[in-house]
Amino acid sequence: MAQINLTISISGKGGTGKTTFTALLLKYLIQNDFKNILAVDADPAVNLGDVLGIRVINNTIGEIVDKTMDEVEDKSEDYDAPTLLEYKIWESIIKNEDLHFDLLSMGKTSGNKCYCAVNKALVAMLDYLKSFYNIILIDMEAGLEHLSRGTDKNMDILFIVVNPSRMSLNTATTISEILKECHLTFKDVYVIGNKFLTNSDKILEDFCKKINFKYVGSIPYDKDIEKLNFDGKSLLNLSENSNAFKKLEEILNYYTFLAK
Ligand SMILES: Nc1ncnc2c1ncn2[C@@H]1O[C@H](COP(=O)(O)OP(=O)(O)OP(=O)(O)O)[C@@H](O)[C@H]1O
Ligand SMILES: [Mg+2]
């Protein structure tokens, strides 16, 4: 079977469900036999590992950048920091061979080093890692700096998660403006609703038309997601019969971007 090569970025206002959606998308990919997937936690708060039931200790890009910077400071001027980082990036990737996905967490550097150093490293690393993975999923941090900083450069698909708050729609509008201003192009930009208690498809469809994005549907509020989260269990354990997962399946089966 031919394998696809796809980079998917997940963005949106804080708390809308980006990390949850990333985990459910990963669950869908694993279940549908996609292999060689890299899940990237680009949120310095490092949440994706928790939601996937993976403990991330001393493995973030932030820590690797810290260590590398210290080593470079001790060496001569022509010391090759990017190559050193490329080599070391594999130290920061947590392998999950049984489930065919790996996890990379961005984290943050120690106080005295610039946060952009981590971002710069992440952008370079993502380009490098594309040739090793079929699918890269990136759970972005809540702010929109990642767009202006170019973290999403050369990504294929952008999902924007919105929830029943006007602010989350405003964030989607701001994203559409930033994409134009920064000349960022994605093959597709999809808006996905999450945690709506009443059917808001029509409102979301009309809203998305105005900003020229495609509305793909909504994942309902699901008490099983809440329970797994509260109990600190992996969302990969969510029942396939859960309302949220069934709806996500319906949406992803309909859109052909994952067609192999
Ligand atoms: N469909 C859902 N049903 C029930 N609870 C949900 C659903 N989606 C998300 N949640 C819960 O809402 C909270 C926020 O979700 P999540 O952490 O995925 O948002 P986020 O956008 O990644 O937040 P942040 O901006 O802080 O990274 C979590 O407690 C999560 O378990
Ligand atoms: Mg999150």
Image (tube, rainbow, N blue to C red):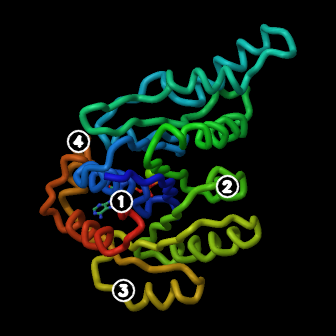
Frontmost of labels 2 and 1 is 1
247 w.r.t. 223: above or below: below
The residue wearing badge 3 is 201
First reached walking from the N terminus: tag 2 or tag 3: 2
The residue wearing badge 1 is 260
69 or 198: nearer the viewer: 69
Question: What residue appears at the point 46 percent right and 29 percent down from the top-left corner?
Answer: 93
The residue wearing badge 4 is 233
Assign the C terminus to one quadrant of the image: bottom left
> Residues under labels 2 and 3: Cα distance?
29 Å
First reached walking from the N terminus: tag 1 or tag 4: 4
Say which amino acid is labelled 4. Lys
Say which amino acid is labelled 1. Lys
Q: Where in the figure is residue 222, as x and y percent of width and height?
A: 22, 65
Asked if residue 112 lies left or right of residue 188, the reply is right
> Residues under labels 2 and 1: Cα distance?
32 Å
The answer to whether the residues at label 1 and label 3 have Cβ atoms under 8 Å apart is: no
The answer to whether the residues at label 2 and label 1 have Cβ atoms under 8 Å apart is: no
The residue wearing badge 2 is 145
First reached walking from the N terminus: tag 4 or tag 3: 3
Asked if residue 196 lies left or right of residue 225, the reply is right
Asked whether mark 4 and ligand 1 are closer than 8 Å, the reply comes as no
First reached walking from the N terminus: tag 1 or tag 3: 3
Name the element at disc 3: helix
The answer to whether the residues at label 4 and label 2 have Cβ atoms under 8 Å apart is: no
222 w.r.t. 149: above or below: below
Asked if residue 19 lies left or right of residue 246, the reply is right
Name the element at disc 1: loop
First reached walking from the N terminus: tag 4 or tag 2: 2
Asked if residue 140 lies left or right of residue 79, the reply is left
The answer to whether the residues at label 2 and label 3 have Cβ atoms under 8 Å apart is: no
Frontmost of labels 1 and 3 is 1
